[in-house]
Image (cartoon, rainbow, N blue to C red):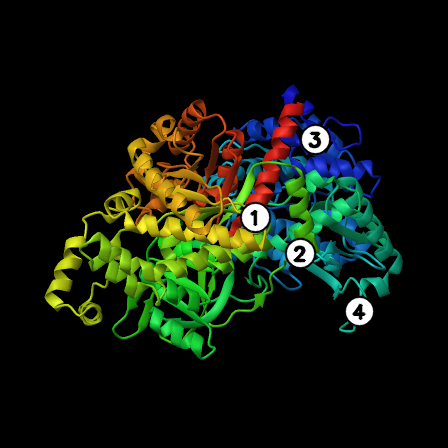
């Protein structure tokens, strides 16, 4: 009992109050008190006492004597968890009012106002403390108070409690137990709170928003929550008290407004004081705050202050503005912005103030928002784009042949897939909003219809894809413009100045490369050359090569692609202007370039001048039970070496051409899907031979670096052997995760939510790097590779390269850089800077 008494403290400037024991609200109120703002007398109740109350231990009456040792004392009780995001039980107002206090109040502020205050507490106590039926306490009108008191007596077989100490004790007990309820625990755990998160409580003298002259309550903040720009916003409601409204209630604008009366006009001194308090709170609390206040007969009481709720774009502007004003250092501004939120700033976003008619929910695979008409295949998407009409490509799941349709669309929506499925990866690279794994969709391709939960949509109907939230909306939503302003640029510059791991971009096209440069990527860490082969000008030659029986015939077919590949690489080198470019050699299985329906097979037979039966047999012969684990990557490069020969020549000839026009180029050639040292030796010998041929033919010298994409567990374990022939090791964590788990990344979305929900996996391993399993392979491979070759470059080029937690891991492991989709480069740059700042702070401690 003595411990509980010591755990209840008046909030004074010198009181020993910390956020861990007493919560954020108690600590914030103490800071306001120290600023000498007009805060009503307040007390903080520590987490230990709250836990004891929840367990059934009462609070000694003498511990509460300071609270109710004054005549007509009324108090409120508010939750004070460690973080405001964790919520808590609802505030209870007017604790302490009884028949005697009610009569005294009536003489001072009028009968109707006093009745409103008493009624508000009776209703709140009956519903939330005594747990009676809310419908029984919905009284209104002149006799409402008497009816509510009578109803309480009838239900509880006793009069409404008149002892203020008993009222407060019961309120504290109810709030303490509500915090430990199963629903409350689940809600706060969803917001990141630990399972045993403690709760403090704050008891505060009531500042009555009623009386003669200007009286009321409201809130004020000094920035726009959506844009982050300076602007006074809030509300003021005169003669307002809790949920009840007394006489003369009137809602006022805060600042002068042509639409109606304002507080600035009605009480300029009050408004000026509020602005002054807001400026002081911003400087002393080092944050943009929303101030809750009460005005009683012209006198202001500051009852609370909370951090302003803000959108992603507002977070950046607020952090930069605080740093510009010297309130926080640049490093703290960098740490205040969630890296993931930057993805929202790069694209259009659905205005959070607009209504949302949700069609379906899925996995938010690529951020941003776009509105367009539904199409079900690439041909329709290209037709809509040719007419200048925006369209959304809707598929069960995308395949490489859908890239043309994804280019022509403004957004992508798929029924299947996860965060590293084909649709997700390509959409992020293109900067298209994308939702995958929307399993409630039913796609009827024959009738060109989309069905979802009893609603039917035709091709051409308008929908909006919100890739940031994972919701597809019916119709055309109101969109906000991207926010790539000066604040955005300067924040990332500050992040770069902090140091950290390097950031490159995965870029397959000139457009990708330009985006990478615009976001200040330090080079291209992964150029997937196979996407270039799906172009309509190259696909016929590629298919001719696949059907060729002799190496000479294959070379002739590939010779048609060589100039186009050379031009691809030349343009990439010129755009990157001397920055490193890592080109992955051909990776996918050959069957992806062939049709599988009868119409497509017939057209292919005509183009190759072959019998349909021969074409069908060849396509069937190339099919594999598990093509992702079949003849692809380096296996294809060894069995059909002409492909890699052509690509190496295109790279080296482009190197010579681009170097003559600008900065010297040192291309980085990456071999995919390696699992044995001998594979590297075989490819290296052929690539070296091609390099020698080009040097002789062009009469010029150049350098290049050959490395390996580590995507198989064996490659990670044998990295020491492989490093002997490699200048760099780049971990392709998409496939490495897939092979380590034995789990298809395209199918994982069907059950991953269940697995994460039941704690099988802490996170989706395709979204956040599995540091215990896959991470151990990365650390093992890096250690063994560097033991063999200390100067070897180590990097990650899977989609984990854009994930903040994974970047932190790579930075701590001493990797040289990460590579991610172009539109995730800003996210990675900010996460890299934050990782460096954390490391520096840890080192300083």
Viewer-proximal residue among 10 and 764? 764
Q: CA distance from mark 3 to mark 2?
A: 39 Å
| Quadrant placement of the C terminus | top right
Answer few, some or many: residues within 10 Å of disc 2's Cα (few below 14, many 20 plus, some between 14 and 19).
many
Viewer-proximal residue among 186 and 73? 186
The residue lying furthest to the top in this view is 2
First in residue order: circle 4 vs circle 1 = 4
**Count of numbered badges drawn on the protein:** 4
Residue assigned mark 2: 225
Residue assigned mark 4: 261
Q: Position of residue 820 (x, y in %)?
A: 48, 47
Whether the residues at callouts 3 and 4 have beta carbons within 8 Å, the answer is: no
Q: CA distance from mark 4 to mark 1?
A: 62 Å
Figure check: 687 above or below 462:
above
Figure check: 829 above or below 530:
above
Q: CA distance from mark 3 to mark 4?
A: 43 Å
Quick one: SS at disc 4?
loop
Residue assigned mark 1: 578
Residue assigned mark 3: 64
Q: CA distance from mark 4 to mark 2?
A: 23 Å
């Amino acid at each position: 009992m003595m411990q509980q008494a010591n755990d209840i403290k008046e909030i004074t400037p010198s009181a020993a109050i910390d956020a861990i024991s007493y919560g954020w609200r108690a600590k914030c109120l103490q800071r306001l008190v120290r600023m000498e703002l007009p805060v009503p007398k307040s007390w903080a109740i520590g987490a230990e006492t709250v836990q004891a109350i929840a367990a059934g231990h009462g609070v000694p009456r003498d511990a509460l004597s300071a609270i109710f040792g004054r005549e007509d004392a009324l108090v409120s009780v508010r939750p004070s968890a460690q973080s405001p995001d964790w919520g808590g039980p609802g505030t209870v107002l007017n604790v302490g009012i009884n028949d005697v206090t009610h009569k005294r109040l009536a003489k001072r502020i009028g009968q109707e106002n006093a009745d409103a205050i008493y009624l508000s507490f009776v209703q709140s106590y009956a519903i939330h403390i005594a747990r009676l039926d809310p419908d029984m306490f919905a009284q209104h009108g002149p006799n409402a108070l008497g009816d509510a008191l009578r109803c309480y007596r009838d239900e509880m077989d006793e009069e409404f409690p008149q002892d203020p100490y008993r009222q407060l004790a019961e309120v504290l007990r109810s709030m303490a137990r509500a915090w430990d309820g199963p629903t409350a625990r689940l809600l706060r755990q969803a917001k990141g709170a630990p399972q045993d998160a403690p709760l403090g409580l704050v008891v505060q003298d009531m500042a009555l928003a009623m009386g003669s002259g200007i009286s009321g309550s409201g809130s004020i903040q000094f920035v726009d929550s959506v844009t982050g720009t300076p602007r006074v916003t809030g509300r003021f409601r005169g003669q307002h008290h809790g949920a009840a409204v007394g006489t003369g209630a009137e809602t006022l604008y805060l600042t002068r407004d042509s639409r109606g009366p304002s507080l600035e006009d009605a009480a300029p001194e009050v408004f000026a004081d509020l602005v002054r308090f807001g400026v002081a709170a911003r400087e002393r609390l080092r944050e943009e705050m929303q101030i809750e206040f009460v005005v009683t007969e012209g006198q202001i009481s500051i009852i609370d202050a909370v951090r302003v709720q803000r959108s992603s774009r507002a977070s950046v502007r607020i952090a930069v503005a605080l740093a510009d004003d010297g309130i926080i250092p640049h490093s703290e501004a960098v740490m205040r912005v969630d890296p993931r939120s930057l993805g929202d700033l790069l694209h259009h976003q659905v205005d959070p103030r607009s209504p949302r008619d949700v069609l379906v929910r899925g996995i938010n695979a690529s951020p941003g928002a776009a509105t367009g008409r539904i199409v079900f295949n690439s041909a329709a998407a290209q037709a809509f784009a040719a007419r200048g009409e925006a369209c959304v490509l809707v598929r069960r799941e995308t395949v490489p042949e859908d890239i043309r349709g994804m280019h022509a669309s403004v957004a992508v929506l798929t029924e299947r897939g996860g965060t590293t499925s084909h649709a997700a990866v390509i959409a992020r690279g293109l900067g298209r909003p994308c939702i995958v794994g929307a399993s409630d969709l039913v796609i009827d391709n024959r009738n060109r219809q989309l069905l979802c939960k009893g609603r039917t949509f035709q091709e051409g109907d308008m929908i909006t894809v919100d890739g940031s939230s994972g919701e597809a909306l019916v119709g055309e939503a109101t969109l906000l413009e991207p926010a790539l302003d000066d604040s955005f640029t300067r924040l990332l510059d500050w992040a770069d100045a902090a140091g950290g791991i390097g950031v490159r971009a995965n870029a397959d096209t000139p457009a990708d490369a330009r985006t990478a440069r615009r976001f200040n990527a330090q080079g291209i860490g992964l150029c997937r050359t196979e996407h270039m082969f799906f172009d309509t000008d190259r696909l016929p030659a590629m298919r001719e090569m696949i059907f060729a029986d002799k190496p000479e015939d294959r070379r002739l077919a590939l010779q048609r692609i060589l100039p186009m590949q050379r031009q691809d690489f030349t343009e990439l080198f010129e755009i990157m202007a001397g920055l490193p470019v890592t080109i992955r050699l051909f990776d996918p299985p050959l069957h992806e370039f062939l049709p599988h329906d009868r119409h497509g097979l017939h057209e292919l037979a005509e183009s190759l001048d072959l019998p349909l039966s021969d074409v069908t047999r060849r396509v069937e012969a190339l099919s594999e039970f598990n093509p992702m684990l079949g003849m692809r990557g380096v296996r294809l490069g060894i069995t059909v070496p002409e492909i890699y020969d052509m690509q190496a020549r295109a790279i080296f000839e482009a190197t010579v051409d681009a170097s003559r026009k600008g900065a010297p180029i040192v291309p980085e050639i990456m071999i995919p899907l390696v699992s044995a040292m001998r594979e590297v030796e075989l490819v290296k010998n052929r690539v070296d031979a091609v390099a020698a041929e080009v040097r002789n033919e062009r009469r010029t010298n150049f350098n290049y670096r050959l490395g390996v994409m580590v995507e198989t567990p064996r490659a990670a374990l044998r990295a020491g052997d492989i490093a002997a022939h490699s200048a760099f090791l780049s971990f392709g964590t998409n496939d490495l995760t897939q092979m380590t788990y034995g789990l298809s990344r395209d199918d994982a979305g069907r059950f991953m939510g269940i697995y994460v929900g039941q704690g099988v996996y802490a996170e989706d391993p395709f979204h956040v790097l599995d540091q215990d399993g896959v991470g151990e392979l990365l650390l093992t491979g890096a250690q063994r590779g560097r033991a063999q070759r200390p100067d070897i470059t180590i990097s990650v080029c899977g989609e984990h390269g854009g994930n903040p937690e994974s970047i932190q891991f790579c930075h701590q492991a001493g990797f040289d850089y990460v590579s991610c989709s172009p539109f995730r480069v800003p996210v990675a740059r900010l996460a890299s800077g934050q990782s460096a700042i954390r490391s520096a702070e840890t080192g300083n401690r």
